[in-house]
Amino acid sequence: MLQAVLSAATEGGETHSPVIPEWYDIIWSSVCFVIILIFFWKYVLPRVQKLLDERGEAIEGNIAKADEAQRKAEAALEEYTAQLADARTEAGRIRETARDDGKKIVAEAKDAATVEAARVTASAQAQIEAERQTALVTLRSEVGTLAIDLASGVIGESLTDDAKATAVVDRFLAELEASEAAAGGKK
Amino acid sequence: MFVAARAELHAPKQEKALLANALNLLVPMSTDDGGFHGPSINEFFPGPLLFEDTPFEINRIMLVRYVAVIALLLVFWLGTRRMSVVPGRFQSLVEMGLDMVRVNIADDLLGKKDGKRFLPILTTMFFMILFMNLTGVIPFLNIAGTSVIGVPLVLAIVAYVTFIYAGVKKSPKNFFKNSLFPSGVPWPVYIIVTPIEFISTFIIRPITLTLRLMMNMIVGHLLLVLFFAATQFFVVTMSGWWTLLGVGTLAFGLAFTLFEVLVAVLQAYVFALLTAVYIQLAVAEEH
């Protein structure tokens, strides 16, 4: 039945089985295949491979560049941090020096003041001593004169003879001092 | 009375005509009476256009194949003419197609090294089949270049030769041992297994490759022709209420056109994939 239908369907009596190849079919199919194979093999795929390689390189290059940039940035940061630390140390050192200098200056000023004060005190004492000596000498001469006048008056005799007078006064004073000293020693 | 006599006189002829009409409706068959034109197997063997009765005969289907080849060359020439590292839209599309074969078929199954070796063959198979399949749904071409046995057969032979070459090149001993005497089987079983393995590997493989592709395309074409011929018949020949049926068949025709696009891609993929699998089995150390 199927055979009948098929033969009815194929007019003109010539039956074609779809699984029996014709020579021209095979030949033209092969030609198409060879053309496409050569086209892909020799033209398309090498170009695509080249492109893929280039793309891979580009990506790798970019990664390398990024790495480089990263490394540079890190180096810069390190340097900066180091500089900052140096600056901090330097600042600390300067502060320390300044503090020391300040202390030294204060101490020097103190010393100078002390010395000055000592000098002033010494000169004041020297002056006082000098004035005391002057006063002593003046007093002594005046006491002498006074005593001689007093004695002259008492003894009625003028102790005009200077030498004598001086000797008397000195003796008197010496006695006086001796008695004072004795009194002081007793005390 | 006279009319009846005449009718009786013509009865055998009418019977024949009725039978023919019934066949017209039931079976794909060409008639020239303006009735239903069903698809027939003869559509795959159109009349010759050039070089009639020589091995270089050219008919409509051969021309359709040339169109597919030219389209393929054009698309890939334009797509890879000026390739840039950062691809444009068209280049991306072409690259995507090539990547499908390179990554999903070649590299996945064969690994980087063998994948690269057999990539030209696999790429050629995939795109040749794809472009020639797609001509089946392209207006005015309307027939798949792969629906005649030549292309499927040639490609199946290429696949056959390729996987045998790959196996023999790698290690002839291993290849035939793995193909015919699978390991892990007690030796008496080889009496049964070896003939089966031989038939399945060396005879069935190319035949299934060929027939799967060709039959898919033939059936797809016949379905589409059936739907559109029916639409033509219902709308134009019958008209009236029959037009409604015609709308139905047209809708089916459109749906199956989309389905054919899917089948076109799928068959191309399956063909290239199976070839890769056969090569992979041939170069495998042990399986």
Image (cartoon, rainbow, N blue to C red):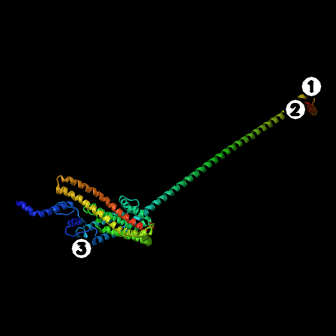
Number of other residues with Cα within 10 Å of mark 1, as a class: few under 14, some 14 to 19, many 20 or more: few
As drawn, the label of residue B173 is none
Report the Cα–Cα distance between label 3 and label 1.
194 Å
| Mark 3 Cα shell of 10 Å, populated few (<14), some (14-19), many (≥20) | few
Q: Position of residue B267 (x, y in %)?
A: 33, 62
**For the point 39% across and 70% down, which residue is it?**
B164
Expressed as whole percent of the image width and height from the top left, the position of residue B145 reads: 29, 65
Looking at the image, is mark 3 or mark 1 nearer the viewer? 3
Query: Could you tell me how far apart the alpha carbons at marks 1 and 2 are, in whole angstroms?
Result: 19 Å
- Dot 2 crowding, Cα within 10 Å, few <14, some 14–19, many 20+: some
Query: From this viewpoint, is residue B78 visible?
Result: no
Identify the image quadrant of residue B112.
bottom left
Q: Given this view, does label 2 or label 3 mark the residue nearer the observer?
A: 3
Q: Amino acid at mark 2?
A: Arg
Q: Residue at x 35, y 66 (%)?
A: B125
Residue closest to the eye, A140 or A83: A83
Mark 1 lies on residue: A153
Q: Which residue is mark 2?
A: A140
Of residues A155 and B160, the one nearer the viewer is B160
Disc 2 element: helix
* Badge 3 amino acid: Asp
User: Tag 3's secondary structure?
Assistant: loop
Residues under labels 2 and 3: Cα distance?
176 Å
Residue at the extreme bottom of the image, as rendered: B54
State the residue in front, B45 or A96.
B45
- In the rendered image, which residue does mark 3 sit on? B53
Labels 1 and 2 within one chain: yes
In-image side of A125 versus A160 (left or right): left
Q: Quadrant of residue A57?
A: bottom left
